Amino acid sequence: MRIVLAPMEGVVDHLMRDMLTRIGGFDLCITEFVRVVDQLLPSRVFTRICPELKQGGVTPAGVPVRVQLLGQEPHWLAENAVRAVQLGSPGVDLNFGCPAKAVNKSRGGAVLLKETETLYQIIKAVRDAVPSQFPVTAKIRLGFDDTSLTLDNARAIYEAGASELTVHARTKSDGYRPPAYWPWIKQIRQTIPLNVVANGEIWTPEDAALCLEQSGSADLMLGRGALASPGLARDIKQHFASGVYQKMPWSQVLELLLQYSDYEIAGDKGLYYSNRIKQWFSYLKLQYVEAEVLFQQLRLQQKAPDLVATLRGALHQISDISEH
């Protein structure tokens, strides 16, 4: 079983990838997308989104990081895919799943699921351009408004030469509303002889087991679930191997939050820190009741030192309780 860390725009940056892959369980990370329009982008665009390219294309824990591209022009996607692998990306992923309105409006992401032929042309152009030792993978949703083209799109992706397909088992219109339709992934797997990675609504090791059963997939991609429960990938592998797992205690999550705070504040002078830490809390609240309580204190704070002091205070409180 392989577990892939999903790209999440504005949340999973290189700092988050570093932290989550150190915990363990992940076999591959996909970056936030590089937006390709009508030019070959300079190297700095790639290394800004994927600083790991300067370290051999892996996180400090040694987990490979694959660059993801988003666009609609086959020629320019192919040119930029070649640049990505030349810079050290272990393959290229193509985004056909992004539901953001601004992206869809400019013919990027999930809107291309309405254009089966365009999917084919993009993947074929990229596959023809990128040396064969590098995987060319794609991520899709089940469709834009409905599932009428799901199997046609999967066939086109396979016939164009993709190495692997990740399926977020919802349409663009479904957004992130439960459920994820995992049995659809089984239909896709029965239609094309390609490895299909299952994605969507995996919050616990029990969810993962059910997803594997219903989808028939061997591999999983985790996004929001890994932010809600930072040890999720490791827990899934433990559960898969032995039937038991130990969820990360809240005190360890607080230590991670403080470590992440140090990373973020040093990395970008805290410019986005306040938003990012609160966004992370919006996921943690789903798996830790303690996060909900602490978030009420953090909610109105804006300055990095105040936020960090609140986190430290919460950790000291736990230490005091455990000592007594």
Image (cartoon, helix red, strand yellow):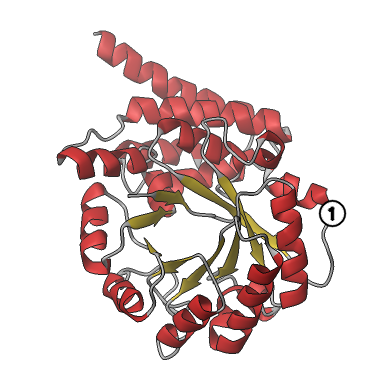
Residue at (78, 52) in percent of width and height: 45
Residue at (59, 82) in percent of width and height: 120
Q: Amino acid at mark 1?
A: Pro
Q: Quadrant of the C terminus?
A: top left
Residue 210, above or below 292: below
Q: Is residue 259 left or right of residue 211?
A: right
**Residue 129 location in percent, x, y?**
71, 67
Residue at (44, 53) in percent of width and height: 223
**Residue 272 location in percent, x, y?**
66, 43
- Please name the residue that numbered disc 1 is placed on: 42
Q: Which residue is outermost to the top? A: 324
Q: Quadrant of residue 302?
A: top right
Q: Is residue 301 visible?
A: no
Look at the numbered disc 1 and give the secondary structure of its residue.
Answer: loop
User: Label 1 neighbourhood size at 10 Å, few (<14), some (14-19), many (20+)?
Assistant: few
Q: Nearer the viewer, residue 184 or 261?
A: 184
Q: Which residue is outermost to the bottom? A: 148
Residue 92, above or below 107: above
Q: Nearer the viewer, residue 117 or 24?
A: 117
**Residue 14 location in percent, x, y?**
61, 41
Q: Nearer the viewer, residue 199 or 229?
A: 199
